[in-house]
Image (tube, helix red, strand yellow):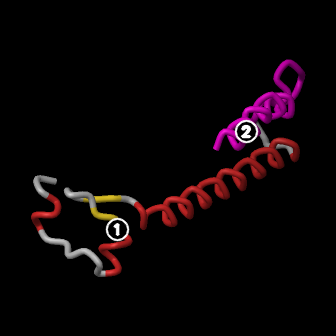
Amino acid sequence: MPQYLGQSLQKVVPVYEAAGFGGSADLYRSAVPAELAIVTERLAAGAAELRDQITDAWRQSADITVGFPLVRVRDAEAGTVRITPATFGAD
């Protein structure tokens, strides 16, 4: 995530430059190819980052613990541990 944020931060000034702030451009009244390219690239990077985070969370979820005493989700799914209402206590 920090790499993604750093790369996005590096694109802030180029977006404003492409829009013509400080110059004589139309200030976002219409999109220019440079603006579209930057925004499209960062949107794709954001979608990829979200996909990767969801995938990581899914893979790690089997090792998360629930209830008390703590039970790994992987063990509950495998049937190694029997889950009862008492397992979750007051949760």
Q: Are marks 2 and 1 in contact (CB under 8 Å)?
A: no
- Secondary structure of the residue carrying tag 2 is helix
Residue annotated with mark 1: 73
Q: Quadrant of the N terminus?
A: top right
- Say if 72 sits above or below 4 in the image: below
Q: What amino acid type should be assigned to the residue bearing mark 1? A: Val
In the picture, the disc for residue 8 is: 2
**Quadrant position of residue 30:** top right
Label 2, residues with CA under 10 Å away: few <14, some 14-19, many ≥20: some
What's the distance in space between the residues labelled 2 and 1, CA to CA? 36 Å
Q: Position of residue 20 (x, y in %)?
A: 85, 27
Position of residue 48 relative to residue 3, above or below, is below
What residue sits 20% from the left and 56% below the top?
A: 68
Q: Secondary structure at mark 1?
A: helix
Task: Residue 7 in the image: state x and y as whole percent.
Answer: 76, 39
Q: Determine the residue positioned at 16% across, 54% down.
A: 91
Of residues 81 and 64, the one drawn nearer to the viewer in this rendering: 81
